Amino acid sequence: MGREIDADTKIKLKVIIEAIEEKQGSNLISLDLSDIESAVTDYFVITNADSTTQVVAIAHEIEKATSKILKEKVWKKEGYENSQWVLLDYGSIVVHVFQTPYREFYKLEELWADAKIKKY
């Protein structure tokens, strides 16, 4: 049996998903990692876009929504320099916004094949 997902994490997941949908992220999924002992977070959220401009727009929308709605800032962020893969760490949720070829190359979904996948 894995970790129990708290209500705050579920609300945060909903806000992040809605922000990605607002900016039309492609192939949007969440991986529930709570049953995987070695996982350092409860969820991965993964999406992709065809341009660096859209990758940045999606990531900024997530940051804006979590700040405005939840009054929560991202703990750590990486990847804005080249915008091929932007990672936003919210503790219980880590968001990966890929440029399409990089998502296809890294295949995070396959690395975490034991996770429960939800498609949006």
Image (tube, rainbow, N blue to C red):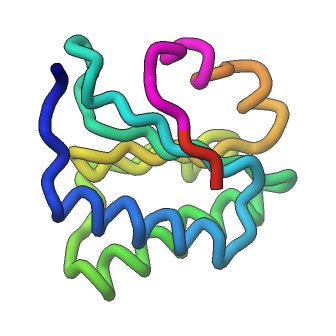
Q: Position of residue 27 (x, y in %)?
A: 74, 47
The percent coordinates of residue 13 (x first, y second) are 37, 60
Name the residue rendered at 41%, 79% in the picture: 65
Q: Is residue 82 visible in this depiction of the protein?
A: no
For the point 56% across and 52% down, the residue is: 80
- Quick one: 77 or 70, which is closer to the camera? 70
Whether residue 56 is visible here, answered yes or no, is yes
Pinpoint residue 55: horizontal percent, then vertical percent. 69, 57
Name the quadrant of the N terminus. top left
Q: Would you place residue 79 above or below residue 34 in this image? A: below
Residue 36 as seen in the image, left or right of residue 105: left
Q: In this view, does 68 lie above or below 75?
A: below
Q: Is residue 111 magenta?
A: yes
Residue 59: quadrant of the picture = bottom right
Give the magenta-colored segment's residue range: 109-117
- Which of the image's four quarters has the C terminus? bottom right
- Residue 12 location (% of width, % of height): 31, 65
Q: How many marks?
A: 0
Name which residue lies at 32% across and 87% down. 68
Q: Residue at x 67, y 20 (%)?
A: 106
Residue 53 sits above or below residue 38 on the image: below
Left or right, 68 with reference to 62: left
